[in-house]
Amino acid sequence: MDITPQIPTELVSGRIKNELLAIAEKIVIQSAKIEGSHNKIVLDALKDILRNVNSYYSNQIESEGTHPFDTEKAIRKEYSKDDKKKRLQMLSIAHIKTQEFIEQKIITEKTQLSKEFIKDIHKVFYTQEEMESFCVIKFKDEIIQMIPGEIRNRDVKVGSHVAPPYDEVEYLLNMFETMYKLPKYMTKSEMLIYVLSSHHRLVWIHPFLDGNGRVSRLFLDAFLYNIEIEGYGLWNISRGLSRCKDDYKNALENADETRISERDGRGYLSNKRLEEFVRFMLEIILDQIEYMADCLKLNTLAIRIENYCKSANQTFLGIHPLPEGSEKIFKALLIKGEIERGEVQDIIGKKKTVTSATIKELQKRYYLISDGPRKPLRLNFNAHFASSLFPELIPPEIK
């Protein structure tokens, strides 16, 4: 039993199909365009809210999504009084913290991907605050205490998928690490095909007693950062997978099939089914990039900011009116990224005392953030603000 083929290839040439490479190349180009669409400070602010959104959609695939509004409250230590809702808030926080860990390790520290890194993702996730209850697993007629970061010690079946025997998991993870250690000379398009293929293979191995879906998607994040797809973090595949999670699960299940015939590649698993899976994932990614590219058009965002402020002041949004001149501050920050506090008075044309009160109010309501009382101001896309600026990214608030 093994995880070959490594990637889907043509039977005779052994190469990746040009059709798949063409889609992958389009993704690389379109993603890079998003990165160049705004000031870096604004893009970093967007990445912050998108971690929250990613947590929502990844957990929703497992039928445990916590609305981004509730996750944002949990980040501020405003927990639900309902134990079940609080538990799910903590699950979302754990996801966000683990994603931050991954970004720190891959982007800043240039940590190499390995089977130990996969174990670290699982360990970091399940050792976050109040995650102990998620480590108590009901397995058949037993209650088992899962140890974060440790490979499963028994055989499992998930749906129709009979996972490899537990005593083969370490061997398969060694094979996984070797197969997906990519040389630098590969093009980004080729690397992307390997990354998406690896996602199925890791899910198929099913290394842990629980949390394999989330960990595999978090590792997919790590791999995409690792191959340096420019613009990644401004879009994320989990939203697309959640919107068609039945198709996603079917694509994963189909790729579990063993080789169908001599014309179905030369590996243990089906080459044809892996190709279908990779194509599915490429199309999901392209759809998400095109969606975010449309959302991030500067003129579109400026108009949506005006409409948001106008609707807030007419109480159509169910929130307290915003201070006069808020839309001018937001639009200035959208272009500049950050502004000195002294500039705000000129932007809104108000007295100093009114300007100070405006800044204080917008900070209190999480529209503006700063590194200190005299430091420059930056835009913060809180969940309510983002849900209006990026329709369909964040679902309507559940009252």
Image (tube, helix red, strand yellow):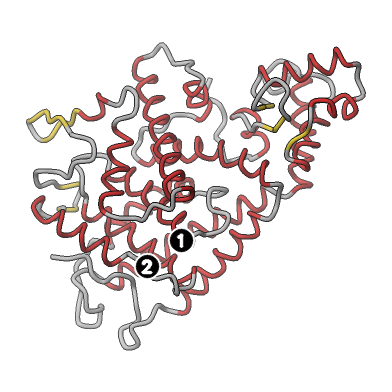
Residue type indicated by callout 2: Leu
Q: Residue 212: image x %, image y %?
A: 27, 45
Q: Nearer the viewer, residue 276 or 76?
A: 76
Q: Which residue is mark 1?
A: 227
Q: CA distance from mark 2 to mark 1?
A: 9 Å
Going by the image, does 157 lie left or right of 100?
Answer: left
Decide: few, some or many residues near mark 2? Use Cα within 10 Å; few <14, some 14-19, many ≥20: some
Numbered label attached to residue 45: none
Comes first in the chain, label 2 or label 1: 2
Going by the image, does 313 lie left or right of 5?
Answer: right
In the image, residue 192 sits, relative to residue 307, either above or below, namely below
Q: Residue 286: image x %, image y %?
A: 54, 60
Q: Quadrant of the N terminus?
A: bottom left
In the image, residue 319 sits, relative to residue 204, either above or below, namely above
Where residue 178 sits, quadrant-wise, is: bottom left
Tags 2 and 1 in contact by the CB under 8 Å rule? Answer: yes
Numbered label attached to residue 182: 2
Decide: few, some or many residues near mark 1? Use Cα within 10 Å; few <14, some 14-19, many ≥20: some
Going by the image, does 399 lie left or right of 299?
Answer: left
